[in-house]
Image (cartoon, helix red, strand yellow):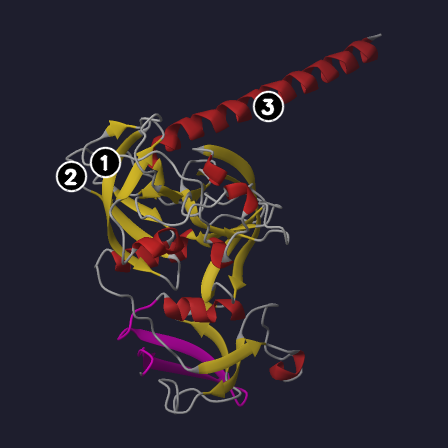
């Protein structure tokens, strides 16, 4: 009898704790979304381009989508949208998020790329439907990041902060306006880290996620459960009919994005260092019978040093790059690490050359015209 009571009590406690944890998780999610939603925006342009039906057009390469049009705004002063406005409608481009109290906005470069040379104005719309005019500060097509600034106002804005690099399997949140559905919230997990997609940019590390991402999410934040930004949503892999999410979405790694944004604030075109080498992952024969302990996926074997490149005469074919600035590197990350640095900056390589460890320092240079 005592054993039966104990078992019933255990089952009751198990169910109670399960319900309590479920409620706590639900409450935490809603609290986080409530906190971050005021810092997520829609990016709208008044450029007159051909209208497309969101649901019948395939996404462009890199996730560059065009969308159904939205009502025109007059964003010289904050105002709410008037859905009955009969004037010419602008084109809804994508999403973004606030990163400073002064109203700096991060989005994708492909979101505003057809607005760079011929654009009447850019409008930033908040979830409370208040809109402001914005200007383009700078952009970098290679990394697909653009920096905007809200103008013609002295208002201060709630902004998002950056978080640490997420872990594989970690819960993440995406907020944006997919397929013209304003400020939609979706949840998912980190499926992979440091994905590199040659058709996008070979040196940009992406976070892969199964969070539902669709046309219109581009430029919006990927966030952890603390409400911190871990990535900038950029593109998806979809089926041949291009209908939308199949659970394979990509966000530009937040750590990498921050290095780009710091340079965008300077207002100048970003020029990146160029090594001038061709490299591959290590193979078993490269390590001289395995006497060099290297973790799988780490280290880069230099196959070729391009003549007259910055590395010519410094690095050699057959060199194995083990570390950069004292840190072990995954071979896929070598280009990304170099591109995040600045021309003129010193860089140190720990090289394995002819079975000897050789430290090499060089000054990073740009690619010659």
Mark found first going from the N terminus, 2 or 1? 1
* Secondary structure of the residue carrying numbered label 3: helix
What residue is disc 3 on? Answer: 22
Instruction: Please name which of the two marks, 2 or 3, marks the residue nearer to the observer.
Output: 2
Quarter placement of the C terminus: bottom left
Disc 3 crowd rating (10 Å Cα; few below 14, some 14-19, many 20+) is few
Instruction: Please name which of the two marks, 2 or 1, marks the residue nearer to the observer.
Output: 1
Residue located at (21% from left, 59% from top): 266
* Secondary structure of the residue carrying numbered label 1: loop
What residue is disc 1 on? Answer: 75
Towards the viewer: 184 or 86: 86
Residue located at (26% from left, 65% from top): 269
On the image, the x and y values in percent for residue 350 come to 44, 78
Residue 144 is labelled as none
What residue is disc 2 on? Answer: 152
On the image, the x and y values in percent for residue 77 come to 19, 32
Q: Report the residue that reaches farthest toward the top.
A: 1
């Amino acid at each position: 009898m005592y054993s039966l009571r104990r078992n019933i009590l255990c089952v009751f406690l198990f169910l109670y704790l399960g319900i309590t944890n479920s409620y706590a998780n639900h409450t935490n999610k809603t609290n986080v979304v409530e906190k971050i939603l005021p810092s997520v925006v829609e990016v709208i342009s008044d450029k007159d381009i051909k209208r497309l039906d969101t649901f019948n057009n395939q996404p462009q390469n890199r996730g560059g989508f065009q969308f159904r049009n939205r009502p025109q705004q007059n964003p010289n002063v904050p105002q709410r949208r008037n859905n009955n406005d009969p004037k010419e409608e602008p084109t809804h481009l994508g999403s973004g998020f606030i990163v400073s109290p002064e109203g700096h906005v991060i989005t994708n470069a492909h979101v505003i790329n057809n607005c760079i040379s011929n654009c009447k104005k850019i409008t930033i719309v908040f979830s409370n439907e208040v809109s402001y005019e914005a200007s383009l500060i700078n952009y970098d097509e290679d990394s697909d990041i653009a920096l905007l600034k809200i103008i013609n106002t002295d208002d201060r804005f709630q902004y998002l902060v950056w978080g640490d690099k997420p872990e594989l399997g970690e819960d993440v949140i995406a907020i944006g306006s997919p397929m013209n559905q304003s400020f939609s919230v979706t949840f998912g997990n980190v499926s992979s880290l440091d994905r590199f997609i040659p058709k996008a940019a070979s040196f940009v590390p992406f976070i892969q996620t199964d969070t539902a991402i669709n046309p219109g999410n581009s430029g919006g934040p990927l966030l952890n459960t603390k409400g911190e930004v871990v990535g900038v949503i950029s593109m998806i892999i979809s089926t041949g009919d291009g209908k939308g999410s199949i659970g394979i979405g990509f966000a530009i790694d937040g750590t990498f994005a921050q290095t780009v944004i710091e340079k965008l604030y300077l207002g100048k075109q970003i020029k990146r260092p160029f090594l001038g080498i061709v490299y591959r992952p290590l193979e078993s024969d490269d390590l001289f019978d395995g006497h060099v302990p290297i973790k799988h996926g780490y280290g880069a074997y230099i196959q070729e040093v391009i003549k007259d490149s910055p590395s010519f005469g410094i690095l050699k074919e057959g060199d194995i790059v083990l570390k950069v600035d004292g840190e072990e590197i995954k071979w896929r990350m070598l280009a990304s690490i170099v591109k995040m640095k600045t021309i003129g900056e010193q860089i140190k390589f720990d090289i394995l050359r002819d079975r000897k460890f050789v430290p090499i320092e060089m000054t990073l240079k740009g690619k010659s015209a």
